[in-house]
Image (tube, rainbow, N blue to C red):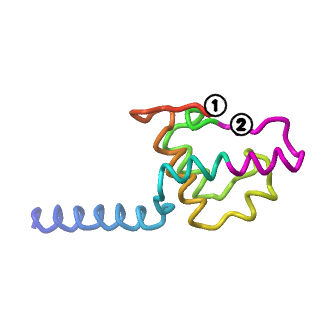
Amino acid sequence: MLGKTMLGLFTLALAVVFVDAAMAIERGNNRKGKYVYRKVYKACFERGAVASKTPPVSPDTKTQAEWTTLFDNRDFGQFGCPEEWEKLSDKDISDIYTYLHDHASDSPTPAKCK
């Protein structure tokens, strides 16, 4: 009886993990994400909306969990340049997410935008 209960709980926990992972944003290309992220701010700068081509938010300003939450909620307001962000495809957003997430403050390789 105890064995069946433990097996049932294990199965339920495993199902929750898989459902949670399926709902998370899809991983993209890290290198392309860095390029697209910079391209967004270059276009925004050329339009005159910002004073610098350098993105205002560096990957190391948040933890991996914070990046995941931000992108799951599609809360891009803090990045500025809303016109450029609205034009991004889901693939581009996935690539940017991967770049920012993989270089977050708690990652093995934190990075700052230069």
Q: How far is mark 1 from mark 2, CA to CA?
A: 6 Å
Chain-order first, disc 1 or disc 2: 2
In the picture, measured across the screen, residue 89 lies left or right of residue 63, that is right
Closer to the camera, 32 or 78? Answer: 32
Q: Position of residue 75 (x, y in %)?
A: 69, 54
Q: Position of residue 71 (x, y in %)?
A: 59, 55
Task: Please state the extent of the stretch shown in magenta in the rendering.
Answer: 39-57
On screen, 59 above or below 70? above
Location of residue 56 by image quarter:
top right
The numbered mark at residue 45 is none
Q: Position of residue 106 (x, y in %)?
A: 45, 33
For label 1, the crowd category at 10 Å Cα-Cα, with few meaning under 14, some 14 to 19 and many 20 or more, is few
Q: Amino acid at mark 2?
A: Thr
> Does residue 33 show up magenta in the picture?
no
Q: Are marks 1 and 2 in contact (CB under 8 Å)?
A: yes
Location of residue 22 by image quarter:
bottom left
Closer to the camera, 29 or 8? Answer: 29
In the picture, measured across the screen, residue 8 lies left or right of residue 42, that is left
At x 59% / y 49%, what residue is drawn? 35
Label 1: which residue? 114
At x 54% / y 59%, what residue is drawn? 94
In the picture, measured across the screen, residue 13 lies left or right of residue 66, that is left
